[in-house]
Amino acid sequence: MSSNKRHQPCGADNRKKKNKKENNDEQEQHATSREDKVDENMNVVNEEEVKEKDDEDKNGSEKSGNLEEPCGYIDMYDLGNWDNIKKGWTEWRDFMVVQGPAKRLPIDYNFPKDGVKRHFSHLHYTRQLGDGKKQDRRWLLYSKKINKIFCFCCKLFSKSDSSQLASVGFSNWRNVLKMLKEHESGREHILFMKQWAELDLRLQKNQTIDKYAQDEINKEKIHWRQVLLRIISVVKTLAKQNLAFRGSNKKIGEEGCGTFLSFIEMIADFDPVMIEHLRRFKERESRTHYLSGRIQNELIALLGNEIKVDDTYGERLFRELQDVLVAFDLKIDDVRGQGYDNGSNMKGKHKGVQKRFLEINPKAFYTPSSNKHWKIFEDRVDGLTFKSLLNTRWESHVESVKAIRFQAPKIMNALVYIAENSVDPQD
């Protein structure tokens, strides 16, 4: 029975456990204070010196201050966001080398603390040498997004994940000083520091290895920009003249290729840019030519979207017409007809003058101008001549109304004929 009983701790056992726990707490506290003391000794940097250094960093990075804008609402100067860069790493590396390391956070910035209240500090930006001198760790960058530190040059040039400072970042603040000392004395870090300095110098002098390739790319950009300018100019010209673009043949240089391709071929008779463009196309050096019907339609649509129509112009014309009627003491309710040219501001069904007139006086029927109608008047009304008024010749007022005064019956017959025989619903 005694072997099956649950063991009850006695008073001696409790005292032993209590003494053991107190000893362990004292050892851990002593180790922590000793470690903090070491950290303090290794980072003996005057607060004013750190502030002065931060001001120098701020002034030294003014060249990139204007460019420090979020890229798609993401701060791409923060190394914690560099994993979002999937393509164009070489171009991004060159850009960042020219800009240099990002501006450091203010001296009064409160860095986030971990579970034991350790955190990154501005003191870590400074390296204390054996002879007592201090050296700035220009390569050391802090990521505000992920609360980690990185090595600027190793992040740009390293192709391996051997160092956290070159890959995912480092945030073990308890061992941060040890990590920094080991990293800055490592062979790879020294090599990447050298590559950083050399590339920076070459970029400043525009003497990079791929300078020739970059020059060729720039030339191509200029060439295609000039080609598009000429194509857009042709599209605008044809659209303004209301001319058809395409013909029965889609091949440039052949009969029936249409107005658009004919204009392009005409420009190529004297323009070096278009001569080179057509040469590449005909010799199959380039499959891109921007001369197809689909491209023409896209350019027409893009240009059409840029055109802003003044919808208020028809309203202004109608007000002017009202003012003229008032000046001649004519009532708008007595008007029984209206006819204008084929301009949209005059004959428009929604915002034209004739529409606004009908809203006030529904009896003022609109009759569109037509050469066919004029031919009927000429055939049925002998000697019909309408004349405009001249402000400087009063006798013209009489002449202008003679045709209506003496030939009113014939004019009426012509109008009846048009109404009875026209197949146009607008008549």
Image (cartoon, rainbow, N blue to C red):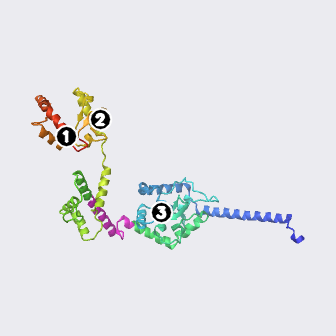
Query: In this figure, which residue is indicated by the disc labeled 2?
Result: 358
Q: Quadrant of residue 28?
A: bottom right
Indicate the position of residue 340 as horizontal and vertical percent values: 22, 39
Residue 393 vertical position relative to residue 373 in the rendered view, above or below: above
Query: In this figure, which residue is indicated by the disc labeled 3?
Result: 84
Q: Quadrant of residue 233?
A: bottom left
Query: In this figure, which residue is indicated by the disc labeled 1?
Result: 418
Residue found farthest to the bottom: 187
Q: Secondary structure at mark 1?
A: helix
| Residue 167 seen anywhere in this rendered image of the structure | yes
Query: At label 1, which amino acid type do we have?
Result: Ile
Q: Which residues are magenta?
A: 201-228
385 left or right of 245? left
Q: Residue at x 28, y 41 (%)?
A: 348
Residue 147 vertical position relative to residue 312 in the rendered view, above or below: below
Query: At label 3, which amino acid type do we have?
Result: Asn
312 left or right of 142? left
* Tag 3 near tag 2, CB within 8 Å: no
Overall secondary structure of the magenta stretch? Answer: helix
User: Alpha-carbon distance for marks 3 and 2?
Assistant: 62 Å
User: Alpha-carbon distance for marks 1 and 3?
Assistant: 74 Å
Residue 275 vertical position relative to residue 356 in the rendered view, above or below: below
Which comes sooner in the sequence, label 1 or label 3? 3
Q: Secondary structure at mark 2?
A: helix
Looking at this view, is 268 or 336 the one in front? Answer: 336
Residue 347 has which mark? none
Query: Magenta segment: does it hold 227?
Result: yes
Indicate the position of residue 22 as horizontal and vertical percent values: 76, 63
Q: Residue at x 43, y 70 (%)?
A: 195
Which comes sooner in the sequence, label 3 or label 2? 3
424 left or right of 391? right
